[in-house]
Image (tube, rainbow, N blue to C red):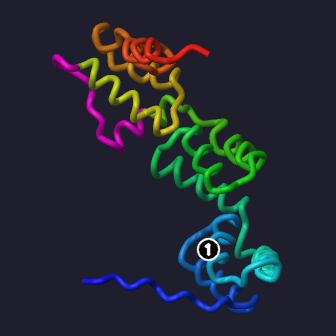
Amino acid sequence: MAFARPKKREPVGEAGLFEYAVGVLARRMRTVRDLRRLMKSRAEEGEAGERAMDAVVARLKELNYLSDRRFAADYTRLRKENEKHGRRRVQQDLAQKGIHKDLVTATLAKAYDDVDEVALAREYIARKRLKQPSGADAQKQTVRVMGRLMRAGFSASVVFKVLREWNLPEEALAGIDEGGRDSDSYAERDEDLPEF
């Protein structure tokens, strides 16, 4: 079965872009940057298309259909309450979505300043059904759990507090430094690096 390339759409003007943008926002929240990226494929090329997109974004903001501030607050709340993600993960996600750094900082301060990240990390472990490392490969399992927690946005100090609560044997924590890395594997890698 041959796949046909999608037909290139005729560029639309401001009214068509507005209609398209409202439809996109009806399906889910978007950032200004994300919406502009989607509209760019339908807008006229050049300065005329940029002006049309600017006008549509301004009108959507005026109608309160589009707000990076509201997006950041809702996204942060959902990630914290539903996914149990830590501050760093949410900060990285918002930055990738094009939210301004000052807005990210303010939103995270409001959402996470009164949060016990150790308790949130415990909730993340329960939600993901991560098991306490045991057996012959306890160190390998510990590194794996640590990696999951770090990718979920928890700092190394929070991760170590949670791991120490599990009363793991010293062998399981041996070789893992407070920075959250398996120091043996990093030492081996450092030897291979060229000097500058």
Choose top left, top right, bottom left or bottom right for residue 170. top left
Residues in magenta? Answer: 122-137
118 lies left or right of 114? left
Depth check, front residue: 15 or 72: 15
Instruction: Give neighbour class at mark 1: few <14, some 14-19, many 20+ (Cα, 10 Å).
Output: some
Depth check, front residue: 100 or 192: 192
Choose top left, top right, bottom left or bottom right for residue 124. top left
Picture layout, residue 120 above or below residue 166 = below
Tell me the residue at 59%/56% (across/down): 75
- Amino acid carrying label 1: it is Leu
Quadrant assignment for the C terminus: top right
Tell me the residue at 34%/24% (across/down): 143
Furthest toward the left, the residue is 136
Tell me the residue at 50%/89% (across/down): 7
* Tally of numbered tags: 1
195 lies left or right of 191? right
138 lies left or right of 186? left
Picture layout, residue 187 above or below residue 163 = above
SS assignment at label 1:
helix
Residue placed under numbered mark 1 in the picture:
38
Choose top left, top right, bottom left or bottom right for residue 155. top right
Quadrant assignment for the N terminus: bottom left
- Residue 85: where, in percent of width, then height? 50, 43
Depth check, front residue: 83 or 145: 145
- Residue 169: where, in percent of width, then height? 28, 10
Taking the magenta stretch, the answer to whether it contains residue 135 is yes
Depth check, front residue: 115 or 42: 42
